[in-house]
Amino acid sequence: MSVFNPDQFLNTTYEGALDTTLIPVPETDEGWTAVVEKFEVKTTPKGQVVCELTWAVDEFEVQQQTGRDKNPVKQALWLDITDHGTLDMGKGKNVALGRLREALNQNAPGKPWSFGMLVGQVAKVAVKHRITDAGDTFADVKRVLPA
């Protein structure tokens, strides 16, 4: 195992060009096996709350197609928040989060739950491509299915 030396790394001269486009995780409705690596809850300038999940797709077929060992895909869950700043547990509220929890077998009535319980969970993620105005293609999670 090699030891990374930042000084040597920064003083090394490289030849050749780097790729300028990223090969996204392929689209699928059946889902790729993935694990929740991390999540971040953010507030938008308009006061909306979103939970952004990063899933790591762990399938050899995807690694072969993208040329990368690590293949993250993002999922955004817009959250309904009460006036007291807590998760709104009312009827018809936080349905996307409820579906995610259901797919992860974490949606049992009366059972305590927190966002930290998402990390490390495995499921199948259906992937859809999103193309930006600049023409870049990103892979987003469109739904989560039980593993």
Image (cartoon, rainbow, N blue to C red):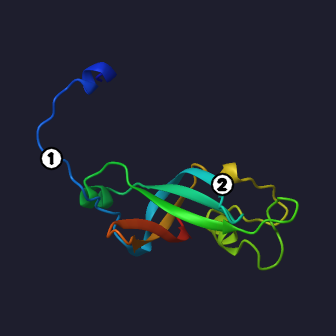
Specify whether residue 101 is in view.
yes
Q: Position of residue 68 (x, y in %)?
A: 29, 51
Measure how far apart labels 2 and 1 are at the Cα level: 37 Å
* Residue at x 15% of width, y 47% of height: 17
Q: Is residue 85 left or right of residue 38?
A: right
In this view of the protein, which residue sits in the foreground, 34 or 43?
43
* Residue at x 46% of width, y 67% of height: 140
Residue at image mark 2: 41
Query: Label 2 crowding class (10 Å Cα cut-off): few <14, some 14-19, many 20+?
Result: some
Q: Is residue 24 left or right of residue 89?
A: left
- What's the amino acid at mark 1? Ala
Residue placed furthest toward the front:
45
In this view of the protein, which residue sits in the foreground, 31 or 135?
135
Residue placed furthest toward the left:
15
* Residue at x 49% of width, y 56% of height: 55
Q: Position of residue 120 (x, y in %)?
A: 57, 49
Residue 35's place in the image compared with 104, above or below, is above
* Residue at x 75% of width, y 69% of height: 80
The label on residue 51 is none
In this view of the protein, which residue sits in the foreground, 145 or 142?
142
Q: Secondary structure at mark 2?
A: strand
The label on residue 17 is 1
Q: In the image, which is nearer the foreground, mark 2 or mark 1?
A: 1
Q: Is residue 25 left or right of residue 48?
A: left
Q: Position of residue 70 (x, y in %)?
A: 37, 49
- What's the amino acid at mark 2? Val
Q: Secondary structure at mark 1?
A: loop
> Quadrant of the image for the N terminus?
top left
**Circle 2/circle 1 CB separation < 8 Å:** no
Query: Quadrant of the rendered structure where residue 107 is?
Result: bottom right
